[in-house]
Amino acid sequence: ALSRRGSAYRAKGDIERAIADYDEASRRDPKSVRALVGRGYAFSEKGEFDRAIADVNQAIRLDPKSPLAYFARGRFYLAAGEAEKALADFNQANANAPDIVQLALWADIAGRRNNQPSHLAQTSSKLDMTVWPAPLVKLFMDQTTPDAVLAAADHPDAIAKKGHICEANFYIGELALTKRQKEDATRLFRQVASECPHGFDEWDAARAELKLLG
C-alpha cells in the first residue's frame, strides 16, 4: 500500500512525499523490489540518477530475474546518456519477460541508439502479434504506417482507447527520433506528456525524452 501510494504521489509530481512512502515501505519490507524501483524512479525525476541506479542495483540483487528492475535501470541509464548500458539492461529485461511487447520495443530503441541491427524479427516470434500492442512492433519493422497504428489503437472502451493512443503516439515519436525527425518527435512527446494517463511508462518516458531534447 505504501509503495502504491508513493507511485500515486509520484504521478502527481509530489516527489518528496513519494520518496517518504517508498522509504517507509523499504523500512517495513527491506526485500521489496517494488519499493526500491519506485524510489529509483522518484530519484530519477529529480535528476539524481546515481541514487536511482543504486536503488535498482539493490532490487536486482534481491531479484536477479526481475524484468521491472532491469527495465527501470535501462530507463535511468538512457536518461543519463549511457545508451550502451541501457541496451544491456533492456535486453536482459526482454530476456526475462519475452512476452512483453514494450520490453522488446525498448531493446530495439536502445539498439538503434547504439547503431545495432534490429532483433525484432526474432523476438516477435515470442509475442502475440494478433492483438494490441503488436501494431507497434510492426511499425518498427516497417510493416505498417503511423496512421495505420493510430487506427489500430481504436477501442470501444474509452479508457482502453486513451491508453492505446498514448502508447501509439509515444512509440511513433521514438521511431521519428531514430530517424532524426526531431520536430515530429518533440511534438509527439509533448502530446504524450500532456494527454497520457500519469501511471503509464510512456507518459514518464516522454517527459524524460523532452528533457534530453532540451
Image (tube, rainbow, N blue to C red):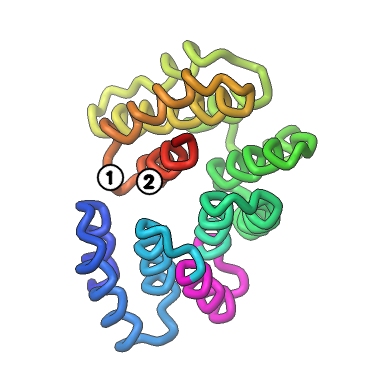
The reply to whether the magenta stretch includes residue 65 is yes
Is 174 on the left or on the right of 143, as rendered?
left
Whether label 1 touches label 2, CB < 8 Å: yes
Q: In front here: 78 or 74?
A: 78
- Check disc 2: other Cα within 10 Å, few if <14, some if 14-19, many if 20+: some
The part of the chain drawn in magenta is 51-68
- Left/right placement of residue 119 relative to residue 159 reads right
* Secondary structure under the numbered disc 1 in the rendered image: loop
Query: Is 146 located above or below residue 59 in the figure?
Result: above
Q: Quadrant of residue 92?
A: bottom right
Please identify the quarter of the rendering in which residue 106 is found. Answer: top right
Query: What type is the residue that disc 1 sits on?
Result: His
- Upstream in the sequence, badge 1 or badge 2? 1
Q: Nearer the viewer, residue 180 or 119?
A: 180
For the C terminus, the image quarter is top left
Q: Where is residue 88 shown, x and y percent of the image?
A: 70, 56
Is residue 182 magenta-colored? no
The answer to whether 137 is drawn above or below residue 142 in the figure is below
In the image, what residue type sits under mark 2? Answer: Asp
Residue 130: image location, x then y, percent = 55, 28
Residue denoted by label 2: 204
Judged by its main secondary structure, the magenta piece is helix
Provide residue 77's location: percent of width, then percent of height.
Answer: 57, 56
- Which residue is at 54% across, 25% downward? 135
Q: Residue furthest right?
A: 117
Q: Which residue is mark 1?
A: 198
In the displayed structure image, the side of residue 213 where residue 5 appears, left or right: left
